[in-house]
Amino acid sequence: MLESPMLLSRVPSVPHGDPADRRTISYDDYVKTGGYEALDKALGMEPKDIIEVVKAAELRGRGGAGFPAGMKWSFLPPQDGEQRFLAINADESEPATFKDQVLIAFDPHQTIEGIAICMRACQLDTAYFYIRGEYHHHRDIFENAIKEAYTHGVFGENSRMGKVNDRWPNLYLHRGAGAYICGEETALLESLEGKRGWPRIKPPFPAVSGAFGRPTIINNVETLATVPPIITNGAEWFKTHGVPRPEGAPPHVPASYGTKLFGVSGPVNKPGVFEEHLGLKLSDAIEKFCGGMMHGKKYKGAIPGGISMGVLGRDQYEAELDFDIGKKYQCLGLGTACVTVIPEDVSMVAMARNCARFYSHESCGQCTPCREGGNWLYKVLSRVEQGDGTTKDLDLLLEVAGSMGSMPGTTICGLADGANWAVRTIMNKFWDEFEAAVSKERFVSLAVVGQ
Amino acid sequence: MAWITKNSSAPIADRTDTPYLSQETKDHFEREIIPRYPTRQAATIPLLHAIQHDHNWLPVQAMEEAAEFLGIPASAVMDTATFYEEFFLQPRGKYTVWVCQSISCEIMGNTKLVDKLSDVLGISPGETTEDGRFTLMNVECIGACGGAPCALVNEKLHENLTVDNVEQILSGLD
Ligand SMILES: Cc1cc2nc3c(=O)[nH]c(=O)nc-3n(C[C@H](O)[C@H](O)[C@H](O)COP(=O)(O)O)c2cc1C
Ligand code: SF4
Ligand code: FES
């Protein structure tokens, strides 16, 4: 069990405090409790040394993909005197994900400090905090925290960071307008430029040509909020948290060091967001942190980190929630580590239909397999759910889902991979329910015969 | 979304002599918002939010005015406006009720809420009541899953809704 939280050190959370006591930490309260010391320390370091510390800590992105942050930061080309950007991804739209909003609403300055350190390390002069349109209350709080940061000389003219690229550093809030796809990093940049959120074909990668065609770093809120404690306490301290590289794995395989925000929703007694070491067991998350299942309902499955990651099955209740989860438990990955618990009395066909509707609705429409495939998955799953499906429909679903995504190589971005993994893992792990749903028509499934 | 013609995105040309984009908003944007970005186009979404905040929806004329102010084609503004769920290109109710339909909310019983609200308001999701007070919308995850099922009424979040208490989110509104 985590002794002292690093992300929620000022935000009461289970088991260290009562979430009902949460309130927004102001600049003054933040500074009184050690806030902005990490920034001061970073200002005394060479930018490249800051990146080295983050690299040594093996901090991985908390936005879904788990890409090593220090490595991302080192991809930037040398400075050329022109603008370089940071885009903070606060779009948080992955279904069942509600972790960043806790940092934004209650301890905004920890994220802002992380932003400032990142700007220093990467020599970025302008940062945009891209927050999803529906976070109204959070937007007001963060806007206010930014103002405080300006008043106290973190940003703006006479910033304690000094000029970067011959400009005073700035942080601006930019509000989205309701589009899941704008969480994808290049769609976010398009949206920031005032356009529709259409993901870009990569390369070029944003580090080389991002916002407004300039070098840009994109990081998740939680990733940046993890940076100040790393700078203060050092990489070795950070690596005493979480789980090391799987045994026998070569050193270039990133480990799962550090703590993570977990958010649990669904029929548990105390749903909510808390912080724990990476590697927390799903069963512990439900029983120790969330008071167990509600009304004695039974666990049937869980979505480990947003629906795009797929599902954990009946026999995967003990799964460790870390970045290695994908390989071990046949899902796409840890994602956002926000868990949806699915009880015995909910139909998995309905769950698959719910996911398919989401992707069909949120597809940006650029790639045919995603635009059309998502819609067909939704239609066919609705038919199966209504009891009008056939066994052939199940084969069709697996075939369509399996052909969608940037990993099969048929689409521009990862939204379609989410549809692919959500639908396929739900079907594969709960095949009995799908078979039962189509049992009116008794054809033998090709998937069962093994073709 | 973008490629689905949502019923809120078929534009209505509603011409008036008074501009939708007020001088005050223009001044504010010229001073505060536009200098934040390397291009004027980047202020499109903030500007559309500002106009919609004042008028509750985005008439074609308003988008044309925005385009002229930003120095970009009107088609570019409309291209952006039609993409995003939050922008209404048709008049909507004074209050928009957004009920989350994503996974955690469905597990916790959102369908019953939508049925109940439809019943009480006499409209289906996507429609506006005749008196122009309420628009009912289904929406994907609004990031409050710990309080599922949940809904937004304009900017106010309501959590842990049930068939019995959901009507309360409509009460106390002027
Ligand atoms: C369809 C799609 C949606 C995404 N949505 C989000 C999101 O809402 N928030 C987020 O932080 N990352 C999201 N991501 C991941 C981002 O593309 C990107 O990897 C991440 O912001 C990088 O930050 P990190 O390295 O700090 O995690 C999404 C990716 C895809 C493909
Ligand atoms: S995969 Fe889907 S969301 Fe991504 S770019 Fe293609 S159509 Fe758009
Ligand atoms: S699933 Fe409804 S708020 Fe997230």
Image (cartoon, grey):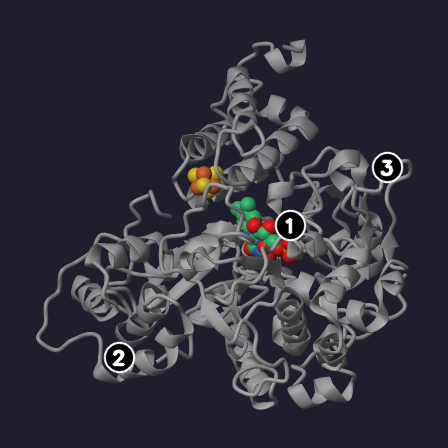
Chain letter of disc 3 in the image: A
Is residue A290 something that shows in the picture? no
Asked if A330 appears above or below A16 in the picture, the reply is above
Q: Position of residue A179 (x, y in %)?
A: 44, 54
The disc placed on residue B26 is 2
Residue at coordinates 31% horizontally, 79% vertically from top-left? Answer: B30
Residue at coordinates 26% horizontally, 59% vertically from top-left? Answer: B77
Check disc 2: other Cα within 10 Å, few if <14, some if 14-19, many if 20+. Answer: some
Q: Quadrant of the image for the C terminus of chain A? A: top right
- N-term-proximal mark, 1 vs 3: 1
**Kind of residue at disc 2:** Lys
Q: Which residue has dot 1 on it? A: A64
- What element does badge 2 sit on? helix
In terms of image quadrants, where is residue A219?
A: bottom right
In 3D space, how far apart are the residues under numbered discs 2 and 3 (Cα atoms)?
58 Å
In 3D space, how far apart are the residues under numbered discs 1 and 2 (Cα atoms)?
38 Å
Residue A82 versus residue A42: which sits nearer the camera? A82
**Kind of residue at disc 1:** Gly
Q: Is residue A23 left or right of residue A274?
A: left
Q: Is residue B51 left or right of residue A40?
A: left
In 3D space, how far apart are the residues under numbered discs 1 and 3 (Cα atoms)?
22 Å
Q: In the rendered structure, are the residues bearing label 2 and label 3 in contact, judged by CB atoms less than 8 Å apart?
A: no
In terms of image quadrants, where is residue B56?
A: bottom left
Q: In the rendered structure, are the residues bearing label 1 and label 3 in contact, judged by CB atoms less than 8 Å apart?
A: no
Q: Quadrant of the image for the N terminus of chain A? A: bottom right
Q: Position of residue A143 (x, y in %)?
A: 52, 79
